[in-house]
Amino acid sequence: LTLAKALAAIVGAENALDDSGSLAAYATDHKERGVPPLVAVLPATTAEVQAIVRLCAAQGVALIPRGAGTGTVGGAVPEAAAVVLDLSRMNRILAVDADNLLADVEAGVVTGDFQRAMEKQGLFYPPDPSSSDTSTLGGNAATNAGGLRAIKYGVTGDWIAGLQIVLADGQLIRAGTRTRKGVVGYDLTRLFVGSEGTLGVIVGLTLRLAPKPATKRTLLAVFADVRQAGEAVLAVLRGPVTPAAMELMDASALAAVRSKLPAPIPPGHATLLLDVDGDAESTAREAAALAEILAGTKMVALRRSASEEEAKALWAARRAISQALYEIRPQRAADDVAVPISALVELFEGVEQIAKKAGVQHACFGHAGDGNVHVNLLYDPADDDESARVKRAREEVFRLTLRLGGTLSGEHGVGVAKRAFVPWEQPAALIDLQKRLKRAFDPLDILNPGKVFP
Ligand SMILES: Cc1cc2nc3c(=O)[nH]c(=O)nc-3n(C[C@H](O)[C@H](O)[C@H](O)COP(=O)(O)OP(=O)(O)OC[C@H]3O[C@@H](n4cnc5c(N)ncnc54)[C@H](O)[C@@H]3O)c2cc1C
């Protein structure tokens, strides 16, 4: 039996794709390009996943778990002959336990679909990657996705009570508990969170929920430069109110979306975009408290949303940045470094200097409350010289990040895009320990081989 036929016997011929048209789509994620897989297989049940894993283990074929392919570091992309395991058909919300604020879902549920389904029941699933309309909950768990609300609510891993995982030998395990607390044995749930498909296939998740906040208010604070905006970030974090989002856009990012700004902001300036959420009374009180804290900083102007529509208008420019950058140059090196929050300003200013020295355009914006900055270096791939300058500048940004006590990825992960740089951040002994863990979970090295570590 050929591999495709054996896989078709498990999932049905229509769910074992081996035509070149279908396979081409699996050669990329949102950014990186690899090679088409031998077969893309789309199981509908955990038993099918187990059978697929056992077959690949028996035949020694690499298996690459994939959610929606919105990753940006090549984690779901084959680099050599492999089967892609597309979990998008496993998209059922299995149970909602409102008393215990838990939900059981399959790994392929689209994040935004889940958020909306919970909101209909007055419940709230806070992790909110900007890709939520397409990314999957399994992919979010495998990358420990962050998002705009992480400053107040944390990242995906903070909302996972347990995971159901198919191991490299086809065995199904359940890590975690259905309790608020639980310290029996090692925290294997956390080990699988962020493991980028290298340790096991996540087939199900038990997610934590919260009551849905009734309202939200948005504030936009304008500063003469990024230094003053950075000082305001620290003032806000020291204050009594934890915003539900706090996004910093520097002059380079604002320049990219100038035509989309709800009110003109002078060149060179920087902004902080903040949300507070809760019930109507606490939200009004918190918005007022935040405005007072900001008034005590070097802020030059403050806009407050009076309605949901105005809040959306204030957020529209922030959401438009990534796409607007393609109007400036056709390609960008987009990284998501994170530094201690007190080093934010040094990072923004340092990136500006690096870009200037390299003679390349850049745009920086980020989740200020997490010290997590999206650094974009823009270039034209047809221009070899500019491409080489961006490559060198990117490495300088990584060195700067590490000098500031930061990490090379705050949310997107390593995949293939940052693999070569992991030894810049972690000592050999730590990398070796993680490789030994990988061997313990996947002795045949069939699950996403070669990813994450060089
Ligand atoms: C427009 C846009 C905005 C984004 N915004 C954010 C953001 O705000 N925050 C953020 O953190 N990221 C963001 N991302 C990156 C990306 O969306 C996240 O990393 C997301 O969690 C990936 O989910 P996915 O289902 O698309 O996974 P994929 O891209 O398919 O896979 C990502 C990794 O997870 C592994 N994987 C996927 N599913 C499973 C599974 N069931 N079991 C085991 N391993 C699995 C894959 O092997 C791969 O290594 C953004 C991307 C885009 C394109």
Image (cartoon, rainbow, N blue to C red):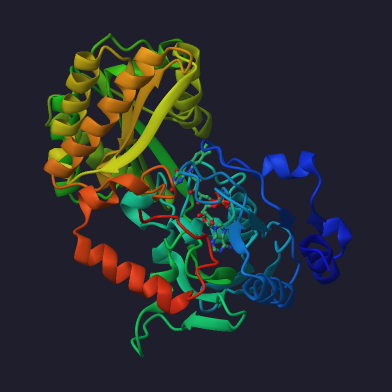
Residue 157 visible (yes or no): yes
Residue depicted at 51% across the width and 78% down the height? 100
Residue depicted at 46% across the width and 77% down the height? 441
Residue 325 position by quadrant: top left
Residue depicted at 44% across the width and 50% down the height? 415
Q: Is residue 150 above or below residue 236?
A: below
Query: Residue 165 versus residue 33: which sits nearer the camera?
Result: 33
Q: Is residue 412 above or below residue 63?
A: above
The image position of residue 324, as x and y in percent, is 48, 19
Residue 221 visible (yes or no): no
The image position of residue 173, as x and y in percent, is 55, 83
Residue projecting furthest to the right: 13
Residue 429 position by quadrant: bottom left
Left-right relation of 418 to 75: left
The image position of residue 133, as x and y in percent, is 61, 44
Q: Is residue 429 above or below residue 386?
A: below
Query: Residue 439 versus residue 264: which sits nearer the camera?
Result: 439
Query: Residue 392 versus residue 229: which sits nearer the camera?
Result: 392
> What is the count of numbered marks?
0
Query: Residue 119 versus residue 141: which sits nearer the camera?
Result: 141
Left-right relation of 217 to 36: left
Residue depicted at 71% across the width and 53% down the height? 38
Left-right relation of 396 to 56: left
Viewport quadrant of the N terminus: bottom right
The image position of residue 190, as x and y in percent, is 38, 71
